[in-house]
């Protein structure tokens, strides 16, 4: 069987390229993970969700994937945060590693195959720095070790920046021991109150950039397929990774570089440094996890995404529509045998459209568009079947439902039981809107009695009273159900 024709945008070449793994049928992926000094915000979560879907889709397409995402647990920000809380830096970092894992599970992010920590990779980091020193790409200065950017003729090939412009924008800060403004720290001499390890240059700790070079090489080799992260990591982090790794090994670090666009809040990039952040766990307290994933995936991963209350409400409303459709379909076909035979229309086209979109640089927005067509077709078959052949309709609905299951394991949505999801959605809306459930149930009973007595005027009057409470009711063959009406915009 021929491999799927996946194309992805490579930041290095600034164009889409066919995915041709170094080893046929296998893809090695490294994604820069969180610096664990605080809770992650939804901008971080968007990046990790995007690459979660990339990995899921590659596996769906039959590739053997090795997925590595690291934890930066040794860093200036961690030390500063620990001093503020009175914790040891290692303890604060471990606490936020666990917090990240909780948030990741809540967002339905699958665990990477390997989740290395900087603190557990010190020997490899020291060895890599020593190689750079031995080859003349790095120099020691009073216990610090710096990478000499001027020694790397290809520096800035990823970001396409001009070195003269960069030099004008950089300054050697007081206390810096580096020779040139663009040189960056590989190893930092120990200071009181900071974690440190032994090295040939004395006690100290790694700089930021060297860690990913060491961890990716340890678990994926000197050259691997895909390196990913957020757009703001292109420079200096990924640029410096390339400089270190390729100077040390003489080999290409990664064949493809993928970067996720920014998530904007009130028209500005979301970042902890700007103070305009929404923490993931705070967002998940207000919106369903699958709805948040749907929001992230509704825009192509490389494009900016605007975050706001209205956007989240719209995403949850769409998820409610999808799950209401699935509940109707399940009530119609679950556990039933409609026999073998032809299907109505061409239901396979939706899965083909889904795969075509995902093959084109993991275009989740296009993939969700294909699924919208699939759900529209399911609603047509359940509400107003265009044919009277019930087994034909049943077989078609079952085939479409199976396609939803196939795509859900790629996107991480539609994975829940429809009834349970809708009940959770309703319960949260009830709490937020202050709806009296007992009064709703009383009115529903009154309406049921009115309908049984064929007092349809009374039944309509009760429906109006429920509407005034903010409740919509749905009459189905399985009975009457209710939900909280959409809030007025």
Image (cartoon, rainbow, N blue to C red):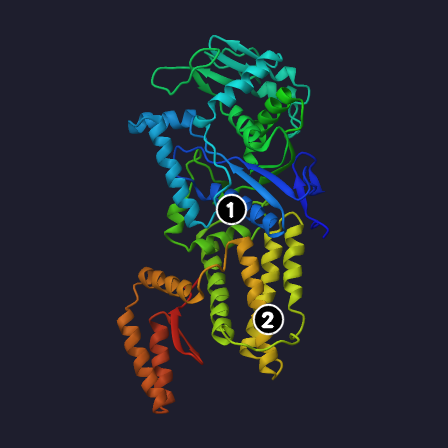
Asked whether residue 185 is in view, the answer is no
- Give the x, y percent position of residue 123: 48, 21
For label 2, count other residues whose C-alpha is less than 10 Å away and answer few (under 14), some (14-19) or many (20+). Answer: some
Check residue 49 in the rendering and tell me which mark sits there, or answer none.
Answer: 1
Q: Nearer the viewer, residue 394 or 273?
A: 394
**Which residue is rendered at x = 50% and y = 57% of the image?**
413
Q: CA distance from mark 2 to mark 1?
A: 28 Å
- Give the x, y percent position of residue 236: 56, 27
Q: Nearer the viewer, residue 93 or 311?
A: 93
Quick one: SS at disc 1? Answer: helix
Check residue 377 in the rendering and tell me which mark sits there, or answer none.
Answer: 2
**Which residue is rendered at x = 48% and y = 47% of the image?**
110
Quick one: SS at disc 2? Answer: helix
Mark 2 and mark 1 lie on one chain; the one further toward the N terminus is 1
Could you tell me which quadrant the C terminus lies in? bottom left
Check residue 128 in the rendering and tell me which mark sits there, or answer none.
Answer: none
């Amino acid at each position: 069987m021929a491999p799927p024709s996946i194309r992805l945008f490579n930041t290095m070449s600034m164009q889409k390229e066919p995915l041709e793994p170094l080893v046929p049928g296998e893809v090695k992926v490294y994604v820069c993970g969180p610096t664990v000094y605080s809770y992650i915000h939804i901008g971080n979560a968007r990046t990790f969700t995007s690459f979660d879907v990339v990995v899921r889709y590659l596996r769906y397409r039959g590739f053997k994937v090795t997925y590595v995402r690291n934890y930066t647990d040794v860093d200036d920000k961690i030390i500063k945060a620990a001093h503020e809380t009175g914790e040891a830096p290692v303890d604060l970092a471990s606490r936020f590693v666990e917090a990240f894992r909780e948030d990741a599970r809540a967002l339905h992010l699958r665990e990477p195959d390997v989740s290395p920590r900087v603190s557990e990779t010190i020997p490899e980091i020291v060895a890599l720095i020593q190689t750079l020193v031995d080859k003349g790409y790095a120099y020691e200065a009073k216990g610090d070790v710096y990478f000499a950017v001027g020694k790397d003729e290809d520096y800035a090939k990823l970001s396409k920046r001009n070195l003269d412009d960069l030099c004008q924008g950089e300054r050697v800060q007081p206390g810096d021991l580096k020779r040139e403004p663009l040189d960056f720290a590989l190893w930092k001499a120990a200071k009181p109150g900071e974690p440190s390890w032994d090295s040939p240059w004395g006690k100290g700790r790694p700089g930021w950039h060297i860690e990913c070079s060491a961890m990716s090489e340890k678990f994926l080799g000197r050259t691997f397929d895909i390196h990913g992260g957020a757009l703001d990591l292109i420079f200096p982090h990924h640029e410096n990774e390339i400089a270190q790794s390729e100077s040390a090994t003489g080999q290409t670090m990664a064949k493809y570089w993928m970067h996720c666009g920014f998530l904007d809040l009130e028209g500005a990039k979301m970042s902890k440094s700007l103070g305009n952040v929404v923490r993931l766990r705070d967002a998940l307290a207000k919106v369903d996890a699958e709805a948040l994933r749907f929001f992230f995936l509704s825009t192509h991963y490389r494009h900016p995404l605007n975050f706001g209350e209205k956007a989240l409400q719209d995403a949850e409303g769409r998820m409610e529509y999808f799950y209401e459709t699935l509940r109707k379909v399940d009530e119609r076909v679950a556990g039933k045998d409609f026999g073998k035979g032809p299907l109505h229309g061409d239901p396979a086209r939706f899965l083909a459209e889904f795969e075509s979109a995902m093959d084109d640089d993991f275009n989740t927005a296009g993939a969700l568009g294909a699924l919208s067509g699939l759900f529209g077709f399911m609603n047509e078959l359940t509400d107003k079947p265009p044919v009277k052949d019930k087994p034909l309709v049943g077989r078609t609905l079952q085939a479409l439902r199976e396609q939803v299951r196939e795509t859900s394991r790629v996107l991480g949505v539609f994975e829940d039981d429809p009834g349970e999801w809708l009940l959770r959605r309703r319960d949260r809306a009830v709490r937020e809107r202050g709806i009296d459930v007992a009064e709703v149930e009383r009115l529903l009973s009154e309406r049921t009695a009115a309908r049984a007595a064929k007092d349809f005027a009374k039944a309509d009057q009760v429906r109006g009273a429920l509407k005034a409470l903010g409740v919509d009711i749905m009459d189905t063959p399985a009975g009457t159900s209710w939900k909280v009406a959409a809030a007025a915009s």
